[in-house]
Image (cartoon, grey):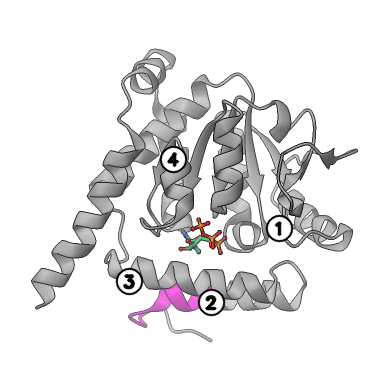
Amino acid sequence: MIPRNHPRYHSLIAREKIACAAREGIVTLEGLTAHGRGEAFDYLLGECTIPSAREAGQVAAALMRTAKNPVISVNGNTAALAAPLIAQLQKSTGASVEVNLFHRSDERIMRITELLKQYGTEVLSGPVSRLLPLSHDRGICHEEGIFSADLVFVPLEDGDRAEVLKNMGKIVITIDVNPLSRTVQYATLPVIDELTRALPCICSYADSLSEKEAEQIAATRKNGEWYIQEARNEILRRFHVLD
Ligand code: ATP
């Protein structure tokens, strides 16, 4: 039992969720280490949503609302930490949801799909094939999903696929708390924030923006590099303050 007033309550709850999901075969052991990297960078960012990440959340909502065929790509860690929020994001944006895994097996796909469905998410099913030019299994996807999407929303992505998707002419939005990752460099829009803080922020903008506001924000968005620089500056600023 984790006491609510524990100073690291949210972090401990997240660890419990991710460990539990690992026991259930939803998260891999490798996924646990990826979570640890995320925690470390979140610590450096002060475990809060910095203003530029909030702004990125608004732009993400606007881009998803104005896309023709947006797809949310979900992996094990995302499902473990944020299955209810993925359902909410699908409702707020009308995006399709596809499970896409680096460590892919039919068993894991089934378990993650079941978890997402429990919270009301409609998950793409049916035949998949290796449609993305990648030598690992993240290249396997649905033709009517990630392959034909004009926008792919990829929380906790790896850099390789972000690059490939961008080269295919898609808008790539990622959530990754690490401003040094290859993923954030390749994404059209990096939301540099912790997953479970970023998703409610994006959902609330997706619900509240008018169509006109969404179009205007999408059309006047900043370059991804600006968000990276802001996050790096925040980390440096925190080191100086702590000195
Ligand atoms: P790169 O993007 O440099 O190719 P990688 O492919 O090695 O990195 P992964 O091992 O897939 O990246 O790690 C996933 C990324 O997700 C890490 O950069 C980590 O900081 C980030 N991450 C992990 N957990 C969270 C979380 N809860 N919220 C936001 N970001 C997270």
Q: Nearer the viewer, mark 1 or mark 2?
A: 1
Q: List x then y, in percent, for residue 207.
A: 46, 31
Is the residue under label 1 in contact with that under label 3 (CB below 8 Å)? no
The disc label shown at residue 102, or none:
1
* Residue holding disc 3: 43
Q: Amino acid at mark 2?
A: Arg
Could you tell me which residue is drawn at 27 percent across and 66 percent down?
Answer: 46
Query: How far is disc 4 from disc 2 in space, using C-alphas?
Result: 23 Å
Name the amino acid type tagged 4.
Ile
Amino acid on which disc 3 is placed = Tyr
Q: Residues within 10 Å of mark 2 (few under 14, many from 20)?
A: some
Q: Earlier in the sequence, mark 3 or mark 2?
A: 2
- Sequence-wise first label, 3 or 4: 3
Q: Which dot, 3 or 2, sits closer to the camera?
A: 3
Helix, strand or loop: magenta stretch: helix
From mark 3 to mark 2, how far is it between C-alphas?
14 Å
Residue plotted at (25% across, 48% down) = 229
Q: Are marks 3 and 4 in contact (CB under 8 Å)?
A: no
**Mark 3 or mark 1: which comes first in sequence?**
3
Label 3 environment density (alpha carbons within 10 Å; few <14, some 14–19, many ≥20): few
Residue 56 is tagged as none
Closer to viewer: mark 3 or mark 4? 3
Find the magenta span and give its range: 5-15
Tell me residue 67's x, y (percent): 55, 21
122 part of magenta stretch: no
- Circles 4 and 2: CB distance less than 8 Å? no
The quadrant of the picture occupied by the C terminus is bottom left
- Can you identify the residue that label 4 sits on? 202
The answer to whether residue 11 is magenta is yes
Q: Is residue 71 visible?
A: yes
Query: Residue 40 at what x, y percent from top left?
Result: 39, 73
What amino acid is found at the position of numbered circle 1 in the picture? Phe
